[in-house]
Amino acid sequence: MKKRNTIGVMLTDINGSYLTDFWLMMEKASKEYDCNLFVCDGRSLRYNKDTDGKHSIVYGFEDKKIIDGLVILSSSVASFIDDLEFDLFLKQFEGIPIVSVGKVIPSATSILVDNKEGMKEQIRHLINKHGYRKIAFVKGPETNLEAIERYEAYLEVLEENNIKLDSDIIFQGDFISHTGYEIMKNIIVENIQYDAIVFSNDDMALGAKRAIKDLSEIYDFDAAKKSIMCGFDDSINLNFIKSHLTTVRQPFEEICNISLKTLIDKINGKDTKEVYKVPSVLVVRQSCGCKSGKNPNEISENYFKLVSNIRMDENIQTYSLEDAFMLLEKDLDSLENLIRKVSHNLMTPIMSISGAATVLEDLVDEYKESIGDNDVTNEDHYEISNEMKKWIEKIKDFNSYISRTVSTAKSQAVQLKADITNKLPKR
């Protein structure tokens, strides 16, 4: 009997920006290659802001006993750790085929995006098309390979155009939206001037756009000039906001197809290439200064159908279309923060329970089909029942995790209520 492959997928924040694109394309590819997906949605390892570090415990749900292979979005999972620490983390998955996206891993097949050429094309566009010379740059995490390549591309294009590097307009970022907000806030307060600013990803660019809007009511500056900017990723968020952001697109459909095809080949013992490299593509819109470009509001009906059951991430909530989505003007208050953290904590186990249920349904169907089949042995039946038991145990683990999360949330809610009560004036 042919067993349907179960592929583990490890990524960070399935609801966030470009990773939503990645998930949607991975789901589409799984149907083409007829495999189950077991998704663990955590956070970047060693990223300690707020409670994100605690989300990474979900990676422990990826169990070698129930997955046949693993796709890791390494560029995101390992953004804040070095190669040695990542190698130690990966030891728990020794013995199963692995495909790494965005970072080379020894003994795994790696799929890399050509970040350099896409970013170079974007910087050249700013220089050759618009005549900009003073181009600011916001870097990504210092240990992230893709961020390093994007910055190197920027430096190389400056050099080929005889533009002297100005360290005063180079800023350290981390791919996080709030960081983009804070960097732009500092630029405005310090009155730092530039012709255009390039962000290493779209999320930071969107954060900067929000800062420009917020601070234009407080400070006297040229908001239009500060808004000449570009990003990188062409994330799904850009389809829901009036950003008109010029950016570089990552070919997620191609990446996901290569990932699953290669991993299934590895599972079946076939030889595969060590490294695949896919191109990135410049997408010109209006934020760079062009008068025309791709209309960001041209969204297909199917796109909405695909994402209708997925929570839009913080960028959508914060940077929505003025005529379709309401902007959240201020930071979330304590209660909203609590709700958001709980929803993040619950998302992975809930999705995983759904995935486990799908696998169990397949196993039940497989068992039914085997009844009366003379080619199916008692050993085959035992194998199917053992598979069912493994997935049932996983569901129990997810249920325990959910119970702990809810219990913690209740305790925090009680404390929050007490804090609010104490702040109220006494009668």
Image: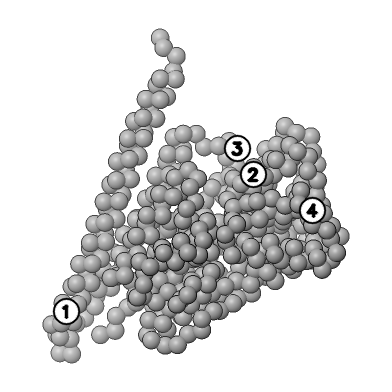
Residue shown at the point (18%, 73%) measured from the top left: 385
Residue position for label 3: 329
Q: Amino acid at mark 4?
A: Asp
- Say above or below: 98 vs 208: below
User: What crowding class fits label 4: few (fewer than 14 Cα within 10 Å), some (14-19), or many (20 or more)?
Assistant: few
Q: Amino acid at mark 1?
A: His
Relative to 379, 354 lies left or right? right
User: Along the polypeptide, which appears first: circle 3 or circle 4?
Assistant: 4
Secondary structure under the numbered disc 3 in the rendered image = loop
Marks 3,4: beta carbons within 8 A: no
Secondary structure under the numbered disc 4 in the rendered image = loop
Residue shown at the point (48%, 77%) measured from the top left: 109
Secondary structure under the numbered disc 2 in the rendered image = helix
Residue position for label 2: 181
Counting labels gives 4
- The circle on residue 381 is 1
Using the rendered image of the protein, determine whether residue 381 is visible from the camera's viewpoint.
yes
Secondary structure under the numbered disc 1 in the rendered image = helix
